[in-house]
Amino acid sequence: MNFILPDLFNFAKKSIPKSKFKGTKKIAGLSNTFFDEVSISFLNPQYLFNQLVHGKIDLELIQVFALMGWENNQWTSKKGKIAMRHWWLSALDKDQQGESIFRHIMTLRVILADTERYPAPKDVIQTMRTTLDELIESGEWTYQINLNVLRALITQDTYKLAMIALSQQKSVISLIQEAGFPTKLPLIQDAELIWLNGWIEMTPSKRSNLRHALSQLLTNTLPLERQNQFIQKILNAASLPKTVQALEKQVENYPELVTWLSTCARNIEFKSTLNLSRDEKDRLACWIGTGNYESLRKILTNIARIHNLSTIDKTTNRYIFWKNYQALFQEAWLLLPPTLFERNETHLHNVKKISAYSYPVVVLKLGNKFIFQSFLGDASENDLLMTDDIEQVERILHQDTISYDHLKNLNLVLIHDHTFKWQSDLAYTLDKHFNIQPKDNIVHYMEGKYRYSNYLEDVNQDFFKAERKDWKNLPRWIENNKRSHKYPEHVFNRAALTAIRYGLITVRLINELEQGVWTDPNTGLMWARISIGQRWENGECIGHAKTLNLHDAEKECKNLNLAAFNDWRLPTVREISSLIIYMDKGYNCPTDILFRPEKNNWGDYWSASSYAYGLTHYVDFNCGRSFTYDQNGSNYARAVRNSR
């Protein structure tokens, strides 16, 4: 049973302070009874008061209104307190007779007396409040429903109100609503802050039982001022460490607060109104960064354990790279395929379902960029992509289910695809091209103590420079994914433009690769990616190369028209030898840049350098050496031109 009738609040909307009794509001529209100023003025409050001094009376509703509006210091006297006692007991008699409206109105007046909307004479309200509390204390107040809540309200005991709600596993607002009391009271807001502090101090299991209540308290629709109050309470909670180093070890135990704080921080208007000290800002960054990092790490590890035990180390080692970037996290999301999402049901708002994709995807916002990293698949499935299309990503992430097709159509660019010493390579790329640096220049490459390195020291070592030579990830990524049709054509075009803008590749490099040519950065020579006999159509190598004698090879190279160039020629032995890997098979260039003449054959290629006795130099790419051969014999040919 509600403590207050559903239509009881209607009287407040219609009340107009016209009564001669100062501070009283005329109440109308209740129980189909209309009371006007004349009706109240005919009553003599002093007479009613004198009657109540001697005992209980058979109350009428209009008498209750008149007494509540009577401003007289007699209420604070000994007789006044006796009269008030009899007044309450008279209302309780009516309640037992089935007329609960008397009790409703009187308790409502006491509860709402301190708000601006329901003013009342001070003496009568104060005496009503203290007398009701005494009746409850003595056991004379026989109406027991929600009695502890009522007492907390009339005594303005915010701590008690918060503790009642916590003990019943409810939010303060739910407790008040279920008891039938009005919710727009100043003490309720104070009690909510105490409730939140009490929740923080609880054990994890008890906090878990109150998860729903917490979600009712910390909503995304709170006014900015209220958000600020809750954030201040969280950042300065007495039971939590004040130093960031100590706090980092605690925030993972509060994933619900991490998610809510992250949501607040995404609001630009919220940021502009937040007034925090430097230490508080550092703690907020710790909550968002470390909290998101740890909560997603736990979920990923559990998924990897279920998916395949052999993938746990690989998954944690990929994710641990971000450990020293935690303080830079502005947002962190985990997108799960439907089967994994249902198996790992979570209450966290930043874990969502992704359709039409087989692997989990971590989405991180660092600065004005979003980074996407896939997990569980092999290296070819774990592209690490970036976009600066912030508004579009924000719109996508606010959907209940994320469409992988929508992600594919973002302005993406590859920033890493697990190459040599990939952690240092990725840290170097983030630093050099995007001005994103990890804490202390340290990147972690594995779980465990001392499993980290200084990427700046790594990238300055000769062997690292030799391996990296040129930034080759994007061209390789484009070629691999074009063949598998992983992304639409326009995605690659936009990826190229973004890569150019951030200095990852040159305009010439991406345009050349699209047109079937490649410029060796070491020699400046431009090479045909195809051999004579093959065709370049729609960005792909078509067919098999053909073998020719030296004369025909020179002629075919000279007549080649590729990428709008017509000055192709057969290379010298020194030029063609620059492409060999000495004493080994393959081409000395990024993977999948130069195409083989046929499957499983690196090929023997003519040079334009003659030797003697009708012999000419050629290069065997199957063993990485040069030889001589009769000019009338047959070899493959690859055209070259001077680009510098």
Image: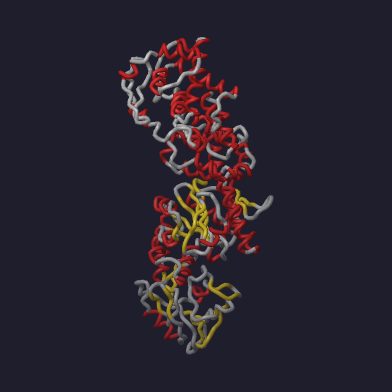
Q: Quadrant of residue 170?
A: top right
Q: 551 or 490, which is in the foreground?
A: 490
Could you say where residue 306 lies in the image, as x and y percent from the top left? Answer: 62, 61
Measuring from the top left, give residue 143's x and y in whole percent.
Answer: 54, 29
Q: Is residue 551 above or below residue 227?
A: below
Decide if residue 448 is on the left or right side of residue 323. right
Q: Quadrant of the C terminus?
A: bottom left
Residue at 52% over, 69% down: 591
**Does residue 91 lie above or below 465 as drawn?**
above
Residue placed furthest toward the bottom: 632
Instruction: Report x, y in % for residue 565.
Output: 36, 72
Residue 422 left/right relative to 638: right
Could one spot residue 609 in this view of the protein? no
The colour scheme used to paint the residues is: secondary structure
Residue 478 lies, in percent from the top left, at 45, 66
Image mark count: 0
Q: Say if residue 384 shows up in the picture.
A: yes
Q: Nearer the viewer, residue 315 or 327?
A: 315
Residue in front for this viewpoint, 579 or 246: 246
Residue farthest to the right, as pictured:
449
